[in-house]
């Protein structure tokens, strides 16, 4: 097997472990944060209050209008607040929406980000940004949005209910899967991705069964870190393009969309990348990658059909038309209109993957 590959490690500091959130002030000092803007949803207010108290008068403001897919108007408001407050550092606490909003600021204002994820989104490890305008989600890569420091504290995820934790974890698993078959995949990213799948698949059922299981929570967060780290250097492919179009156009919940679509895209690519599928299946502890993913989501009790999370039957044809605007030339096998239609219809109905 050829060992020729290119792997570009990305900058960034990771602080991982139970109780590490107490180091937020020190980590903010480390990146030179003297005027800190916090980005976090009001839903997390009590947690955020506790975390940022040690910042004292360095905390100059909070942006709380956090929404999924980062609508362009939300990005504009966050950028305006950062400018008005002369913020020189952004601390984001929460899931992908909070992190995405912080990235929207850093995209136009060169400030370091200290990320404190409380879900398994994984975007805290990547230089990928995303903005939604007029129902269309645009993504890009820019080193300016790569968080300078990420604090992973599994204690902060203990309050994450199973209905959120499970799809968030499968969303992380989707990063691992996609990192294995895109052109930029390498032996290094494949190692991280396979370990991420193994850890997530082993931890998430325990997280759902017992929300207070700190060891399981730590395992899931570790898997999410590996997923984000692998995905950060490989970039996205067919699966993420489908999910970004569906989420942006129809305002579908991000993690649930990824969770539902993933088994169908894996089944579509199965014959084109057999070695990758064997690696995924082995990490899942099963004989078939798509069937293994279907079984895992069933065990976790996550949504199974796009119609159950807000997509209507009338939306299917429009979704396919929007998907046809994307470029899939880097996918492991050619993608036709009929293929996209079949994937979306199956995911809409929740057809079993066996």
Image (cartoon, helix red, strand yellow):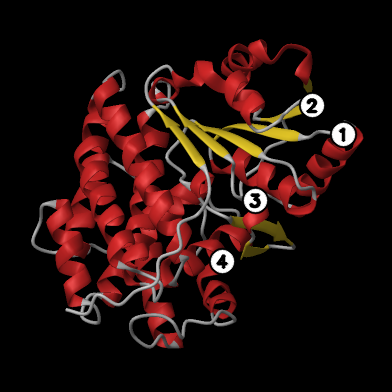
The answer to whether the residues at label 2 and label 1 have Cβ atoms under 8 Å apart is yes
The image shows residue 289 at horizontal and vertical percentages of 19, 63
* Residue identifier under label 4: 245
Q: Nearer the viewer, mark 4 or mark 1?
A: 1
Q: Left or right: 115 with respect to 345?
A: right
- Residue 277 disc label: none
- Mark 1 — residue? 86
Q: Nearer the viewer, mark 4 or mark 3?
A: 3
Return the residue at label 3: 145
The residue that label 2 is drawn on is 35
| Image height of 173 relative to 312, above or below | above
State how far apart marks 1 and 3 are (Cα): 18 Å
Whole-percent x and y of residue 186?
32, 68
**From this viewpoint, is residue 306 visible?**
no
Of the numbered discs 1 and 3, the one sitting upstream in the chain is 1
The quarter of the picture where residue 217 lies is: top left
Please tell me in which quadrant of the rendered image residue 4 appears. bottom left
- Residue located at (43% from left, 49% from top): 256
C-alpha distance separating marks 2 and 1? 7 Å
How packed is label 4: few (under 14 Cα within 10 Å), some, or many (20 or more)?
many
- Is label 3 in a helix, a strand or a loop? helix
Tell me if mark 3 has few (under 14), some (14-19) or many (20+) residues whose alpha carbon lies within 10 angstroms of its own: many
Question: Label 2 neighbourhood size at 10 Å, few (<14), some (14-19), many (20+)?
Answer: many
**Dot 2: element:** loop
Quadrant in which the N terminus appears: bottom left
Q: Earlier in the sequence, mark 2 or mark 1?
A: 2
């Amino acid at each position: 097997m050829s060992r020729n590959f290119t792997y570009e490690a990305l900058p960034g500091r990771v602080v991982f472990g139970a109780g590490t959130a107490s180091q937020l002030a020190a980590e903010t000092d480390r990146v030179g944060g003297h005027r800190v803007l916090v980005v976090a949803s009001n839903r997390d207010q009590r947690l955020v209050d506790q975390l940022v108290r040690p910042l004292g008068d360095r905390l100059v403001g909070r942006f709380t209008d956090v929404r999924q897919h980062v609508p362009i108007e939300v990005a504009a408001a966050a950028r305006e607040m950062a400018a008005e407050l002369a913020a020189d550092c952004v601390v984001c606490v929460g899931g992908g929406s909070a992190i995405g909003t912080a990235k929207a600021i850093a995209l136009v204002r060169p400030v370091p980000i200290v990320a404190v994820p409380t879900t398994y989104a994984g975007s805290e490890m990547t230089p990928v940004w995303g903005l939604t305008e007029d129902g269309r989600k645009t993504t890009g890569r820019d080193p300016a949005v790569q968080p300078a420091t990420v604090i992973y504290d599994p204690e902060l995820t203990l309050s994450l209910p199973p209905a959120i934790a499970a799809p968030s974890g499968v969303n992380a698993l989707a990063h691992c899967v996609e990192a294995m078959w895109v052109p930029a995949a390498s032996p290094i990213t494949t190692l991280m991705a396979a370990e991420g799948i193994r850890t997530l698949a082993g931890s998430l059922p325990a997280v759902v069964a017992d929300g207070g299981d700190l060891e399981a929570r730590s395992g899931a967060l570790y898997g999410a870190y590996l997923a984000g780290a692998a995905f950060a250097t490989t970039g996205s492919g067919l699966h993420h393009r489908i999910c970004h179009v569906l989420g942006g156009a129809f305002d579908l919940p991000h993690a649930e969309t990824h969770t539902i679509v993933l088994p169908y895209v894996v089944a579509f690519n199965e014959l084109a990348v057999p070695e990758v599928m064997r690696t995924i299946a082995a990490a899942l502890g099963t004989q078939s990658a798509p069937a293994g993913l279907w079984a895992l989501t069933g065990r976790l009790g996550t949504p199974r059909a796009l119609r159950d999370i807000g997509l209507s039957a009338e939306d299917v044809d429009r979704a396919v038309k929007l998907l046809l605007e994307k470029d899939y030339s880097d996918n492991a096998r050619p993608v036709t209109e009929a293929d996209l239609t079949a994937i979306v219809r199956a995911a809409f109905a929740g057809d079993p993957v066996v």
